[in-house]
Image (cartoon, grey):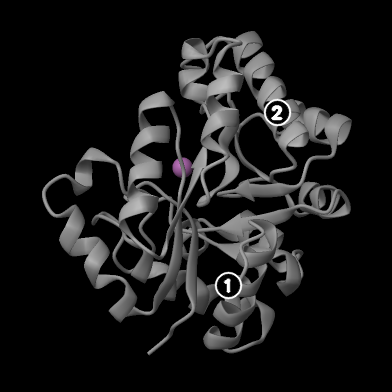
Amino acid sequence: MLHHIFDTHAHYDDERFDGDREAVLASLPSKGVHAVLNAACDKKSCLTSIELSRSYDFIYASVGIHPHSADEFSESDTELLAGYTKLPKVVAIGEIGLDYHYDFSPRETQKLVFERQIQLALELDLPIIVHDREAHADTMELLQKYRPRGILHCYSGSAEMAKEILKLGMYIAFGGAVTFKNARKTLEAAAAVPLERLLVETDCPYMTPEPLRGTRCDSSLIAYTAQKLAELHGVDPQQLLDRTCKNAYEVYQIAE
Ligand code: NI
Protein backbone atom coordinates (compact mmCIF):
# COMPACT_ATOMS: atom_id res chain seq x y z
CA MET A 1 0.00 0.00 0.00
CA LEU A 2 1.17 3.53 -0.75
CA HIS A 3 2.12 5.47 2.36
CA HIS A 4 3.80 8.75 3.38
CA ILE A 5 0.85 10.74 2.05
CA PHE A 6 1.16 14.32 3.35
CA ASP A 7 -2.01 16.13 2.36
CA THR A 8 -0.79 19.74 2.36
CA HIS A 9 -4.27 21.24 2.00
CA ALA A 10 -7.56 19.87 3.35
CA HIS A 11 -10.80 21.19 4.84
CA TYR A 12 -12.02 18.58 7.33
CA ASP A 13 -14.02 21.26 9.13
CA ASP A 14 -16.30 21.43 6.07
CA GLU A 15 -19.94 20.58 6.78
CA ARG A 16 -19.78 17.68 4.31
CA PHE A 17 -17.81 15.82 7.01
CA ASP A 18 -20.31 16.63 9.78
CA GLY A 19 -21.94 13.20 9.63
CA ASP A 20 -18.81 11.06 9.95
CA ARG A 21 -15.79 13.31 10.56
CA GLU A 22 -14.32 11.25 13.39
CA ALA A 23 -14.65 7.98 11.51
CA VAL A 24 -13.05 9.42 8.35
CA LEU A 25 -10.15 10.96 10.25
CA ALA A 26 -9.57 7.88 12.39
CA SER A 27 -9.32 5.74 9.25
CA LEU A 28 -6.71 7.87 7.47
CA PRO A 29 -3.49 6.60 9.12
CA SER A 30 -4.37 3.02 8.15
CA LYS A 31 -4.81 4.19 4.53
CA GLY A 32 -1.28 5.52 4.18
CA VAL A 33 -1.94 9.09 5.30
CA HIS A 34 1.02 10.35 7.26
CA ALA A 35 -0.02 13.97 7.92
CA VAL A 36 -2.63 16.57 6.95
CA LEU A 37 -2.63 20.37 6.96
CA ASN A 38 -6.14 21.65 7.61
CA ALA A 39 -6.37 25.05 5.92
CA ALA A 40 -8.50 27.79 7.45
CA CYS A 41 -10.50 30.18 5.26
CA ASP A 42 -12.26 32.49 7.71
CA LYS A 43 -12.21 33.34 11.41
CA LYS A 44 -14.50 30.46 12.33
CA SER A 45 -12.42 27.88 10.49
CA CYS A 46 -9.21 29.19 12.10
CA LEU A 47 -10.68 27.92 15.35
CA THR A 48 -11.98 24.63 13.97
CA SER A 49 -8.64 23.96 12.22
CA ILE A 50 -6.79 24.57 15.48
CA GLU A 51 -9.26 22.30 17.27
CA LEU A 52 -8.59 19.50 14.75
CA SER A 53 -4.84 19.92 15.19
CA ARG A 54 -5.30 19.50 18.93
CA SER A 55 -7.43 16.39 18.57
CA TYR A 56 -5.32 14.46 16.04
CA ASP A 57 -1.58 13.88 16.18
CA PHE A 58 -1.22 13.89 12.41
CA ILE A 59 -3.18 17.11 11.73
CA TYR A 60 -1.55 20.54 11.49
CA ALA A 61 -3.36 23.86 10.98
CA SER A 62 -2.99 27.10 9.09
CA VAL A 63 -4.78 30.33 9.96
CA GLY A 64 -5.83 33.04 7.55
CA ILE A 65 -8.66 34.75 5.70
CA HIS A 66 -9.57 33.43 2.21
CA PRO A 67 -10.38 35.98 -0.53
CA HIS A 68 -14.04 34.87 -0.39
CA SER A 69 -14.15 36.22 3.18
CA ALA A 70 -11.90 39.25 2.62
CA ASP A 71 -14.83 41.49 3.60
CA GLU A 72 -14.76 40.17 7.15
CA PHE A 73 -11.09 41.13 7.69
CA SER A 74 -10.14 44.14 9.81
CA GLU A 75 -6.72 45.37 10.91
CA SER A 76 -7.15 43.99 14.44
CA ASP A 77 -7.35 40.51 12.92
CA THR A 78 -3.61 40.59 12.28
CA GLU A 79 -3.15 40.39 16.07
CA LEU A 80 -5.72 37.63 16.34
CA LEU A 81 -3.96 35.58 13.65
CA ALA A 82 -0.52 36.30 15.09
CA GLY A 83 -1.76 35.02 18.46
CA TYR A 84 -2.96 31.77 16.91
CA THR A 85 0.43 31.20 15.28
CA LYS A 86 2.00 30.90 18.74
CA LEU A 87 0.23 27.53 19.09
CA PRO A 88 2.63 24.65 18.38
CA LYS A 89 0.78 23.04 15.44
CA VAL A 90 -0.18 26.22 13.58
CA VAL A 91 2.44 26.20 10.84
CA ALA A 92 1.34 28.63 8.09
CA ILE A 93 -0.77 31.64 7.12
CA GLY A 94 -3.48 30.49 4.73
CA GLU A 95 -5.34 30.09 2.75
CA ILE A 96 -4.97 33.62 1.45
CA GLY A 97 -4.98 35.09 -2.05
CA LEU A 98 -7.21 36.29 -4.86
CA ASP A 99 -10.30 34.80 -6.46
CA TYR A 100 -11.52 36.67 -9.53
CA HIS A 101 -13.68 33.74 -10.63
CA TYR A 102 -16.29 34.16 -7.89
CA ASP A 103 -15.49 37.75 -6.85
CA PHE A 104 -17.29 37.21 -3.52
CA SER A 105 -15.39 40.21 -2.13
CA PRO A 106 -14.45 43.33 -4.14
CA ARG A 107 -11.08 42.90 -5.87
CA GLU A 108 -9.56 45.93 -4.17
CA THR A 109 -10.50 44.45 -0.77
CA GLN A 110 -9.11 41.05 -1.76
CA LYS A 111 -5.80 42.62 -2.75
CA LEU A 112 -5.48 44.64 0.45
CA VAL A 113 -6.30 41.64 2.66
CA PHE A 114 -3.92 39.36 0.74
CA GLU A 115 -1.12 41.94 0.96
CA ARG A 116 -1.66 42.52 4.68
CA GLN A 117 -1.49 38.78 5.40
CA ILE A 118 1.68 38.38 3.31
CA GLN A 119 3.24 41.15 5.41
CA LEU A 120 2.09 39.36 8.56
CA ALA A 121 3.63 36.07 7.41
CA LEU A 122 6.93 37.84 6.75
CA GLU A 123 6.84 39.47 10.21
CA LEU A 124 6.17 36.06 11.79
CA ASP A 125 8.59 34.21 9.48
CA LEU A 126 5.89 31.74 8.41
CA PRO A 127 5.07 30.27 5.00
CA ILE A 128 1.87 31.28 3.21
CA ILE A 129 -0.66 29.09 1.39
CA VAL A 130 -1.83 30.94 -1.72
CA HIS A 131 -5.20 30.57 -3.44
CA ASP A 132 -5.08 32.07 -6.96
CA ARG A 133 -8.11 31.61 -9.16
CA GLU A 134 -8.17 33.57 -12.41
CA ALA A 135 -6.00 36.22 -10.75
CA HIS A 136 -2.54 35.17 -11.96
CA ALA A 137 -1.17 38.63 -12.85
CA ASP A 138 -2.13 40.32 -9.57
CA THR A 139 -1.01 37.27 -7.56
CA MET A 140 2.41 37.28 -9.22
CA GLU A 141 2.76 41.04 -8.71
CA LEU A 142 2.34 40.69 -4.93
CA LEU A 143 4.52 37.55 -4.69
CA GLN A 144 7.30 39.24 -6.61
CA LYS A 145 7.01 42.38 -4.50
CA TYR A 146 7.30 40.54 -1.16
CA ARG A 147 9.02 37.23 -2.04
CA PRO A 148 7.34 35.27 0.79
CA ARG A 149 8.02 31.59 1.52
CA GLY A 150 5.24 29.13 0.92
CA ILE A 151 2.96 27.27 -1.42
CA LEU A 152 0.87 27.94 -4.51
CA HIS A 153 -2.09 25.71 -3.74
CA CYS A 154 -4.28 23.92 -6.32
CA TYR A 155 -2.05 25.29 -9.03
CA SER A 156 -3.92 26.36 -12.17
CA GLY A 157 -1.42 28.64 -13.92
CA SER A 158 0.84 28.00 -16.88
CA ALA A 159 4.21 26.25 -16.95
CA GLU A 160 5.80 29.67 -17.57
CA MET A 161 4.24 31.12 -14.44
CA ALA A 162 5.31 28.02 -12.49
CA LYS A 163 8.92 28.76 -13.43
CA GLU A 164 8.56 32.32 -12.07
CA ILE A 165 7.15 30.95 -8.81
CA LEU A 166 10.03 28.46 -8.53
CA LYS A 167 12.50 31.33 -8.95
CA LEU A 168 10.95 32.88 -5.83
CA GLY A 169 11.77 29.68 -3.93
CA MET A 170 8.14 28.68 -3.46
CA TYR A 171 6.58 25.20 -3.64
CA ILE A 172 3.71 24.25 -5.95
CA ALA A 173 0.90 21.91 -4.92
CA PHE A 174 -1.28 19.79 -7.19
CA GLY A 175 -4.47 17.95 -6.39
CA GLY A 176 -7.13 15.83 -8.05
CA ALA A 177 -7.33 18.17 -11.06
CA VAL A 178 -4.24 16.51 -12.58
CA THR A 179 -6.34 13.36 -13.10
CA PHE A 180 -9.16 15.15 -14.94
CA LYS A 181 -9.63 14.66 -18.67
CA ASN A 182 -9.08 18.35 -19.49
CA ALA A 183 -5.86 18.57 -17.46
CA ARG A 184 -3.41 19.21 -20.31
CA LYS A 185 -2.32 22.70 -19.14
CA THR A 186 -2.09 21.62 -15.50
CA LEU A 187 0.00 18.58 -16.47
CA GLU A 188 2.38 20.78 -18.46
CA ALA A 189 2.80 22.94 -15.37
CA ALA A 190 3.26 19.91 -13.08
CA ALA A 191 5.95 18.56 -15.41
CA ALA A 192 7.81 21.87 -15.10
CA VAL A 193 8.02 21.60 -11.31
CA PRO A 194 11.02 19.56 -10.11
CA LEU A 195 10.28 16.85 -7.52
CA GLU A 196 12.01 18.83 -4.79
CA ARG A 197 9.44 21.65 -5.08
CA LEU A 198 6.35 19.55 -5.66
CA LEU A 199 3.57 18.97 -3.11
CA VAL A 200 0.38 16.91 -3.17
CA GLU A 201 -2.95 17.93 -1.70
CA THR A 202 -6.68 17.22 -1.86
CA ASP A 203 -8.56 20.46 -1.04
CA CYS A 204 -11.06 17.89 0.27
CA PRO A 205 -14.03 17.53 0.37
CA TYR A 206 -13.60 19.07 -3.11
CA MET A 207 -11.49 18.15 -6.17
CA THR A 208 -11.89 14.37 -5.95
CA PRO A 209 -9.51 12.67 -8.41
CA GLU A 210 -10.64 10.38 -11.21
CA PRO A 211 -11.93 7.67 -11.25
CA LEU A 212 -13.94 8.79 -8.19
CA ARG A 213 -14.74 12.33 -9.33
CA GLY A 214 -18.21 13.35 -8.11
CA THR A 215 -17.86 11.63 -4.73
CA ARG A 216 -16.57 13.23 -1.54
CA CYS A 217 -12.79 13.44 -1.37
CA ASP A 218 -10.48 12.57 1.54
CA SER A 219 -6.70 12.49 1.93
CA SER A 220 -6.32 8.79 1.12
CA LEU A 221 -7.39 9.52 -2.49
CA ILE A 222 -4.09 11.35 -3.02
CA ALA A 223 -2.91 7.90 -4.13
CA TYR A 224 -4.58 8.59 -7.52
CA THR A 225 -3.03 12.05 -7.81
CA ALA A 226 0.38 10.65 -6.89
CA GLN A 227 0.05 7.94 -9.53
CA LYS A 228 -0.51 10.56 -12.23
CA LEU A 229 2.28 12.87 -11.06
CA ALA A 230 4.71 9.95 -10.71
CA GLU A 231 3.98 8.85 -14.28
CA LEU A 232 4.65 12.42 -15.45
CA HIS A 233 7.99 12.56 -13.63
CA GLY A 234 9.07 9.01 -14.48
CA VAL A 235 9.35 7.83 -10.87
CA ASP A 236 7.28 5.32 -8.94
CA PRO A 237 4.34 6.58 -6.89
CA GLN A 238 5.92 5.71 -3.55
CA GLN A 239 9.08 7.62 -4.44
CA LEU A 240 6.92 10.62 -5.32
CA LEU A 241 5.02 10.40 -2.01
CA ASP A 242 8.26 10.02 -0.02
CA ARG A 243 9.69 13.13 -1.65
CA THR A 244 6.55 15.27 -1.42
CA CYS A 245 6.18 14.29 2.24
CA LYS A 246 9.74 15.45 2.89
CA ASN A 247 8.99 18.69 1.01
CA ALA A 248 5.91 19.31 3.16
CA TYR A 249 7.99 18.97 6.33
CA GLU A 250 10.45 21.48 4.86
CA VAL A 251 7.94 24.10 3.76
CA TYR A 252 5.92 23.94 6.98
CA GLN A 253 9.14 23.67 9.04
CA ILE A 254 7.84 20.75 11.08
CA ALA A 255 10.51 18.87 13.02
CA GLU A 256 10.42 15.18 12.09
NI1 NI B 1 -8.81 25.16 0.04
Instruction: Tell which of 35 and 5 is nearer to you.
Output: 35
Q: Position of residue 172 (x, y in %)?
A: 67, 56
Queried on whether the Cβ of the residue with tag 2 lies below 8 angstroms from ligand 1, the answer reads no
Q: Which mark is residue 143?
A: none
Residue 146: quadrant of the picture: top right
* Residue 210 appearing in the image: no
67 horizontally vs 252: left or right: left
Q: Which mark is residue 120?
A: 2
Q: Secondary structure at mark 1?
A: helix
Instruction: Tell which of 137 and 241 is nearer to you.
Output: 241
Q: Position of residue 82 (x, y in %)?
A: 60, 30
Residue 134: quadrant of the picture: top right
Q: Which mark is residue 245?
A: 1
Residue type (three-letter) at the residue carrying disc 2: Leu
144 horizontally vs 43: left or right: right
Q: Residues within 10 Å of mark 1 (few under 14, many from 20)?
A: many
State whether residue 246 is above or below residue 141.
below
Q: Secondary structure at mark 2?
A: helix
**Which residue appears at 36% of the width and 69% of the height?**
221
